[in-house]
Image: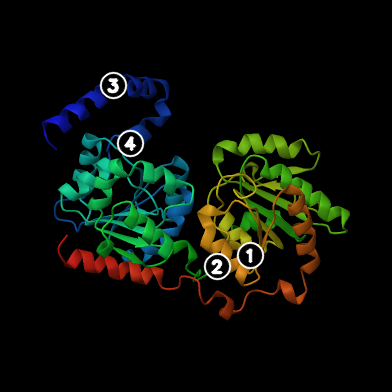
Amino acid sequence: MGPVGHSVAALTALAGAPILAIAWLARPASRDSWSQRLGAAPETPPDAPAPLWVHGASVGEILAAGRLVDAWRARGGDVVTSTTTQTGRAVASAARPDVPAILAPLDHPWVVARALSRVRPCALVLVETELWPSWIRAARAREIPVVVVSGRISDRSFPRYQRLRRLLSGSMRRLSFVAARSAIDAERFEALGVPRDRIEVIGDLKREPVAEERPLNEGLSRLLGDCPLFVAGSVHPGEERASLEALAAAEEAGHAPALVVAPRHPQRFDECALVLRASGRRVVRRSEGAAAPLDAGDVLLLDSLGELGALWPRASVAFVGGSLVPVGGHNVLEPVQAGVAVIFGPFTENAREAAEHVLRIGRGTRVLDAPGLCTAVVRAFEAVGSDSAQAPSDSTLEDLDEGTTARTLALLDRLLAGPR
């Protein structure tokens, strides 16, 4: 970094110092988090092998990267993970307690330089679209390969990135490689400045078939009871109310399910509880511990982290949120891979290929609004037990991105063995 760059870095550090100081004094419990934000990453001993640094924005990305983390460690490699959100860090720590999980450093030249100097990674792996300019520049200055895996540019983001192309072009050119999830994403990365010979369509880690079912916590299993379950996962504001309406519609049609609501973001747990309790139904919070098992018409608020994936196989009917409201949708493949047909709304640009896939194989239903969700839920309960409710055969899942983890590992091997 030249004199101008150092001057800009100094000015931004000076401007941000008062804000950081206030946050440090006002919230003592968050000081560990701020230390990580300021580059206090795990230190790799000088004589230890360089770890792979895997970074994902939040829960979905770090869970998808779990396959890659496990595969790298199975070969004897060390891994450090980071997320942008505290929720993501908590989920990463719970899923793999023996893998360091930290908050990503602020994208300031001095901060990322400190973090990289401590971790000394063999490569920096960014999941999906985590394109932080200072972090990428600092890594490449140390000849650390920077690889984007499951690379995607969403329909909503692409026009914005195009407008910022001149500002982004330097970061795009510095990327060692982009393992794109689809041909469309590959074209978009190239349009934004990544050289074509550094892009390959390798697949989406989220779309890779699940090797084995995640175990369901014994306490949660007891709490679920024996009644049919309508599971509304990754919901955003407004979608919990729509789920309650769909539960009522199912009851009016003669069905007797319980409802499980899993908010996408932990900061909404209390807000969601208020909405659910306003319905007059019995509402159980997962965090409250032991309770009588759910009965028909009851609602379970899944205010815990990392349990939704293991719960999908217990669902009779599944709805994936972020899709009735203009958020862009979430992973609609998880319930399908668990053997449950999925319902989702019209907003699925963040999960476009997955949504098209489940529609194509007849394992998904797209609705336009809350009344449409009610109709779809009633029909789904009517189908339970019929041939249409059977788990998808191998042939219907054969065009999922099987082998994505293996192809990503081969790419990393190639990059680490050759010129960087």
Query: Disc 1 marks which amino acid?
Result: Pro
Local packing at callout 2 (Cα closer than 10 Å; few below 14, some 14-19, many 20+) is: few
Question: Which tag, 4 or 1, sits closer to the chain's start?
Answer: 4
Measured Cα–Cα span from mark 4 to mark 2: 34 Å
Q: Which of the two discs, 3 and 4, sits closer to the camera?
A: 3
Q: Which of the two discs, 3 and 1, sits closer to the camera?
A: 3
Mark on residue 213? 2
**Kind of element beneath mark 4:** helix
Could you tell me if residue 182 is visible in this image?
no
Query: Disc 4 marks which amino acid?
Result: Arg
Q: Position of residue 382 (x, y in %)?
A: 81, 66
Q: Residue at x 20, y 44 (%)?
A: 138
Question: Which tag, 3 or 1, sits closer to the chain's start?
Answer: 3
Q: Quadrant of the C terminus?
A: bottom left
Measured Cα–Cα span from mark 4 to mark 1: 37 Å
**Kind of element beneath mark 1:** helix
Tag 3 residue: 15
Q: Which of the two discs, 2 and 3, sits closer to the camera?
A: 3
Measured Cα–Cα span from mark 3 to mark 1: 50 Å
Do the numbered discs 1 and 2 sit on residues whose CB atoms are within 8 Å?
A: yes
Tag 4 residue: 37
Q: Which of the two discs, 4 and 2, sits closer to the camera?
A: 4
Do the numbered discs 3 and 4 sit on residues whose CB atoms are within 8 Å?
A: no
